[in-house]
Amino acid sequence: MIKEVDNALQVIVDTEIGEGQFVIKFDAPTREKVAEWGGAHAVDLFLYEIHEDRAKRSCGRISVYQKNGEAPTLENLGPEYKIGEYEAPRFFALTYMLTVWTGTPMDEHQVLGQLTARFAHEQTLLLPSLESIPILKLLGVTASLEISELPQDRIFTDLWPAIGNTHTPFVSLTVTLPLVWFDAPAIEYRVDKVTVRFPDEVPNAAPSITEPPAGNTGRRPQIKGTCVAGATVTVATTNGTITPATVTPGGTATTWTLPNLTDDLAIGRHELTATQTVPGSAPSPASTPLTITVVATPARLVVWGEGADQLTTGAPTEQGFTQVACAGAGGVNYPLVAVAIDKDGKLRVWGQNAAQLSEAPTEEGFTQVACTGYGRAGTLVAVAIDKDGKLRVWGQNAAQLSEAPTEEGFTQVACTGYGVVNYPLVAVAIDKDGKLRVWGQNAAQLSEAPTEEGFTQVACTGLGGADSPLVAVAIDKDGKLRVWGQNAAQLSEAPTEEGFTQVACTGSGRADSPLVAVAIDKDGKLRVWGQNAAQLSEAPTEEGFTQVACTGSGRADSPLVAVAIDKDGKLRVWGQNAAQLPEAPTEEGFTQVACTGSGGADSPLVAVAL
């Protein structure tokens, strides 16, 4: 029971400050222990006292009744339906000392204050072992959580001297557990045969939820993840219910997809968790919560900018789109094209240059798409990830990316290049292990990609010629920015801290039109760098941004622009070419944005948002 409380408190701490940001300890914070941590940022939850809360003690026994197939009840249904008796619950208090250790008092105070606010908000602690006890459900009793008061004289005379360390600010947390004892009716049985079954595999870890992505989503998102073979997965939310909530992939499958939801999720914030059960075993611990925000109106496509006329005719008008990409320089001879994924996961192509991408795959279930090319006849190509995680390439320039990896499980893809003979294309995708995979006729310019696993997001840019080589930026498992490619010098001064969540980059890569990149850090702040950073230097400075896109060749006559989505879902446009994207929609609730165009007077910019 105590270990279950430890796990629940750890989940709350990880959720509040970010999993992996701090080491979670349960030791007495002695000088020796703190020294052993070696300066690592740590949150310590020291269980220093256990006692019975006698003020809540009661006596007596409570009978529980149950008819066949019906829920247990306290109503007296007669002796034949009596399934047993419980003693009245007794309540035991577990008191923890919460301390933060960073080596810097101001940082410790900030995190301690953040955790204090979170624990002050929490009033109950959901423990699966208690949830499974019928009498506690019938009595409406659960584990409570509160910030408790400690007599001041004990802080100095008992607690810290016993620990053997200098008095440090801490929060005292008390978890009060109801404990019950059950007596079943005495029944005589004769055992003729005993069969013991050992499960082939008992999950010792939680499953994972891989979709939908964190952030805004519609009322019936597709929910997917991974599990052990033979498991039944159950998904839960902190905001209402999920219907249906259970799936059994069957066979040796280690991925799962929840059936299409039959009821809308409640509007607002949800924390989704999953557990898995193999026949003959208890349910696994819950997965790390995935935070999504369910919005009332499914996403619709909104097009604006001086080049908008090239993408307005033929644009889909229905709701429920999940992702969009666009490409082309934007001039009369280099018209634009856009590709979006609708609510069924189908690819929808439109724009004045749609003919170059007209042979898109027609099945459902696509999850991500990217496209590139200058827009001249025969230069455009698109790459999409289908429901099995396979890469699908098409377009009049598909030959330049024809040797794509063929296995399943890819999660993200990006591509770039001018698309003509001397400026060929390249693509980078992230496979099921989080490894970067580079291919295309210009792959040599990005051949020295990092080789470890765990990457989560990638972007690339450059025309791809000898005078305008390519560069790519990826985010590794620690949220660090990794830059590589023949033009990496133009983006070499990337921020070095951890926790970045999204990145975009643009520019032709020539000496007169150098590159720039924009990333979103762990606080949701926009960070701009690169040899052309001056053109995007006036980025908004507040926190909470969730997505960013940028475009433009970067020359003085075709400068750069960027569009980001803030914490309220509002579109924010800036850059030396912001005038080409005037009158952006002003409402809240946007979740995704893309933009394209070289940015010259004869090749104006356009943006598309969901």
Image: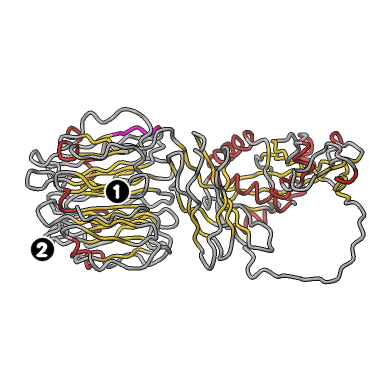
Q: Residues within 10 Å of mark 2 (few under 14, many from 20)?
A: few
Q: Callout 2, which amino acid?
A: Val
**Label 1 packing within 10 angstroms: few (<14), some (14-19), many (20+):** many
Question: Does dot 2 land on a helix, a strand or a loop?
Answer: loop
Q: Is residue 569 magenta?
A: yes
Mark 1 or 2, closer to the camera = 2
The residue lying toward the viewer, choosing from 507 and 489, is 507
Find out whether residue 414 is within the magenta segment. Answer: no
Q: In this rendering, is residue 352 above or below 413?
A: above
Q: Quadrant of the C terminus?
A: top left
**Prevailing SS of the magenta stretch:** loop
Q: Position of residue 122 (x, y in %)?
A: 64, 36
Residue at 63% over, 57% down: 284
Tell me which residue sits at (79%, 39%) in the image: 154
Instruction: State the extent of the magenta-drawn residues as a range.
Output: 568-572
Disc number placed over residue 493 in the picture, else none? none
Quadrant of residue 584 in the image?
top left
Q: Which residue is mark 1?
A: 504
Coordinates of residue 533 in the picture (x, y in percent): 24, 44
Residue type, label 1: Ala
Provide the residue designation for mark 2.
421
Image coordinates for residue 427, horizontal then vertical, percent = 26, 60
98 vs 510, left or right, is right
